[in-house]
Amino acid sequence: MGKDLPPEEWVYDQYVAVGRTIELDLVTIFSSLDSVTLRFHAETSDPSLVTVAIDDGVLTLESVGGEGSTDVTVWATAPRGRSAVADFAVFTDFGGSIELAAAASVGDTIQGVLGRGDEDYFEVSVPTDAFRLRAFTQGDAAPVGALYDANGTRIARDHDTGAGLNFYIIIRELAAGTHYIT
């Protein structure tokens, strides 16, 4: 007696921080199909946000950069033509902690959307001692900004020195090395 087919379409919400990967066990997700001989195929609607790869029944979602959402569709096919589809809504965001900080370079302009309670961290490599660093936001969100050293010690914080209620941080003599801006 064959196993029951899964629902025709499953929907999952998945959050992926920039620079992070998430792995999903497809054999478990499609457990109602014959898992020994499943063939998988996956596509993303926006490969500029998230890439997909399948290896040995594991779907890897890798955030490429930026903020936004994309759909990922996975098809599983078993012997005798049985198949199922899973759709994933994948949301990308800049890193929400120092450990997940998105890479940024000196001189970068990064565009994104700040929502209530949203924290975005960026890792910046300062090339030389006595480097002048300026970080600021523009728009209507009124965010709080902070600069941290490589150990996570806060160096500066601001919430409304910039235009409108935006933050504006300027450090005139910063030591070379890794720093974080939120």
Image (tube, rainbow, N blue to C red):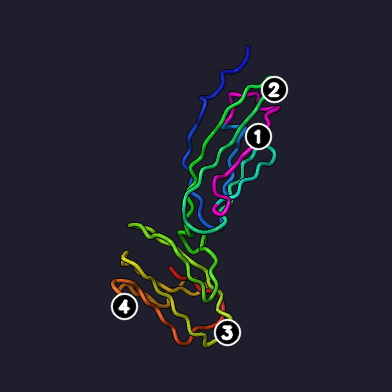
Q: Amino acid at mark 1?
A: Phe
Residue drawn at the location 57% of the way across and 47% of the way down? 22
The N terminus is located in which quarter? top right
Left or right, residue 76 beside residue 120: right
Label 2 CA crowd tier, 10 Å (few <14, some 14–19, many 20+):
few
Q: CA distance from mark 2 to mark 3?
A: 61 Å
| Residue placed under numbered mark 1 in the picture | 40
Residue drawn at the location 48% of the way across and 42% of the way down? 89
| Residue placed under numbered mark 2 in the picture | 79
The answer to which of 105 and 121 lies nearer the viewer is 105
In the rendered image, residue 39 lying in the magenta stretch gets the answer yes
| Residue placed under numbered mark 3 in the picture | 128
Q: Amino acid at mark 3?
A: Thr
Image mark for residue 161: 4
Label 1 CA crowd tier, 10 Å (few <14, some 14–19, many 20+):
many
Q: CA distance from mark 3 to mark 1?
A: 49 Å
Among numbered discs 2 and 3, the one appearing first in the sequence: 2
Regarding mark 3 in the picture, which secondary structure is present there? loop
